[in-house]
Amino acid sequence: MLEANDKAQLEKAQANSASALAKLAEVEQEVAGLRSEMESNNQEIQRSLSNLLSLMEKFVAPHEPGGRVARTGLATHTVTKEDDARPALTKSSADPSVHELFKRALQKPQPASVYLR
């Protein structure tokens, strides 16, 4: 029937196919893990985008119809001519403005977890 050489090749092919199937199973598990990670990342991106959209809506139309405006007392701050001429003295460099924070967030987006802390 089969020669000894043919039998050896057949056994070797079966061993190779078994190892290939094991490798294929590992790859399928990795792909499934990556797929679930991508889905969770997509959900996080959707939450971030909806948060960004709500913030943008507040910037565009800050007052909801029928909503009440909260009146709060604000601390007064007088800007003198000297302060106006030297803006570095009026504001510490540790506190960036909201405009700068928003600009930085749009230029270099971060994962939603950074913004939700």
Image (spheres, rainbow, N blue to C red):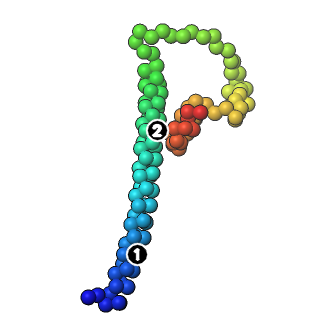
Foreground: disc 2 or disc 1 = 1
Secondary structure found at label 1: helix
Secondary structure found at label 2: helix
Camera-side residue: 28 or 98? 28
Q: Would you say 90 lies left or right of 50 here?
A: right
The picture quadrant where one finds residue 1 is bottom left
Q: Is residue 77 visible?
A: yes
What is the spatial separation of the Cα atoms under label 2 and label 1, in whole angstroms?
44 Å
Which residue is at the far front? 1
Q: Residue 69 in the image: x percent, y percent?
A: 50, 10
Camera-side residue: 73 or 30? 30
Please report the residue visible at 41 percent of the width from the left and 61 percent of the height from the top: 25
- Disc number placed over residue 39 in the picture, else none: none
In the displayed structure, 25 sits above or below 76; it is: below
Which residue is at the far left? 1
Q: Would you say 46 lies left or right of 108 here?
A: left
The picture quadrant where one finds residue 66 is top left
Please report the residue visible at 45 percent of the width from the left and 34 percent of the height from the top: 47
Disc 2 crowd, CA 10 A, few/some/many (<14, 14-19, 20+): some
Q: Which residue is mark 1?
A: 15
Q: Is residue 86 visible?
A: no
Q: Which residue is mark 2?
A: 44
Q: Which residue type does callout 2 highlight?
A: Glu
Q: Which residue type does callout 1 highlight?
A: Ala
Disc 1 crowd, CA 10 A, few/some/many (<14, 14-19, 20+): few
Q: Residue 38 in the image: x percent, y percent?
A: 43, 47
Q: Residue 67 in the image: x percent, y percent?
A: 45, 11
How many numbered marks are there? 2
In the displayed structure, 96 sits above or below 68; it is: below
Please report the residue visible at 43 percent of the width from the left and 21 percent of the height from the top: 61
